[in-house]
Amino acid sequence: MIPQRGVYTVGNRQFFNKVPALQYATETESQVTWSYGDEYFSQFDWETEPTESLSQLYIDRCQQLRDDYDYLILYYSGGSDSHNILTHFIKSGIHIDEVVSFYPIEYYEKKHGANLSTDKKEMQNEWYYTGLPDFKNLTKLIPNTKLTLLDYTRDCVNLDIPDDWQDIVGEVLHANIAKRTSIFKDKNLLLQSEKGKVALIHGIDKPRVFTVNGDWYFAFLDLIAGLTPALPRSLLNSGAVTEHFYWSDKSVKMLIKQAHAVKKFWLSNSTTFPPPQQKKISFEIRQIYDNITRSIVYPYWRKEIFQIDKPTSLWFNDTEIWIFDESKKVSTFWNDFYMQLTSSIDKKYMQSSLENKNPDGFVGFWSKWHKI
């Protein structure tokens, strides 16, 4: 199995977490490279499109997970990636044991009511207009599936995090550190891992396809692979395994099919909008490409779904900035950690958003390019 966040090589050392890799690179003034199963994926013929439909390949992945594990947990946001997974489980009749969503419900009920604003600070609206209706509908569609809603309000405000929180969250260093660690506190997860193999399924991610000098390529990006929380030490020897539904060594045909679908769209499309390039682009342009890609590769995507505007900042995430106002403890802890982090890593490895000139995330690293 490919390491969850890939492998960083710095000098003659390898790292499975980006932060210590960049700290070591800064200390030794060494070059950083990143691999996400480069040798494995290079064995396949990326230039020949599989004959199966995308839906069939999604169903095959659902069945493979069902066959390999005793208990399947899907982390569900209602967004395009996780919605596509859940839809194919339901339409194929393949049982999924548990669907988990997480929101700061207690905070929403205390401070907010629903409104129709799509402002990125109004995350509660996605719960009221998307998450909650989805859960109500799922109770009818899949009554034998356990539906779990994790409220992380108190964990965040109280900064209730384990000692190994940095290993768990990786480079996703939002104010909501406790949110990303609290998903492992579900007693049902611990109970099921004692009984057998448990798959923690995450919708990582839409295909990254781009053109360079007339040729087309697919590649993985570490910023995306790093979005998934890593297992805490307490679960490392359990039956729990993190599974990227799409970016997996078991999903090669799916990835190749997705890549060709995206390539064919751009080659046949008459739009004046330029095809994706392998270069740094603005957040707004990336959102346009992602919207186009999801419409190509996810056959059941709900275009009419209510969604707020996506945050443009990586670390100072607008949807979670409420925690600073609610908790002096979190604000002090985060500011101290931020100063420590930014002083131990060379600024060339950091990036800033247009709204915030201070470092608010790391630069991305690409895997090997696979020509399609």
Image: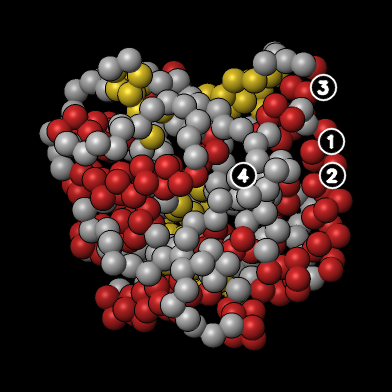
Q: Residue at x 36, y 38 (%)?
A: 207
Rounded to the nearest angstrom, the CA distance separating label 4 from label 1 is 19 Å
Callout 3, which amino acid? Answer: Glu
Q: Nearer the viewer, residue 299 or 210?
A: 210
The reply to whether residue 249 is visible in this rendering is yes
Q: Nearer the viewer, residue 184 or 109?
A: 109
235 vs 272, left or right, is right
Quickly name the residue at label 4. Answer: 353
Is mark 1 in CB contact (under 8 Å) with mark 2? Answer: yes
Percent x, y for residue 335?
83, 53
Marked residue nearer the N-terminal end (4 or 2): 2
Marked residue nearer the N-terminal end (4 or 3): 3
Q: Residue at x 47, y 60 (%)?
A: 309
Q: Which mark is residue 339?
A: 2
Quadrant location of the C terminus?
top left
Can you tell which of label 4 and label 3 is closer to the viewer? 4
Quick one: label 4, few (<14), some, or many (20+) residues within 10 Å?
some
Callout 2, which amino acid? Answer: Met
Quickly name the residue at label 3. Answer: 27
Marked residue nearer the N-terminal end (2 or 3): 3
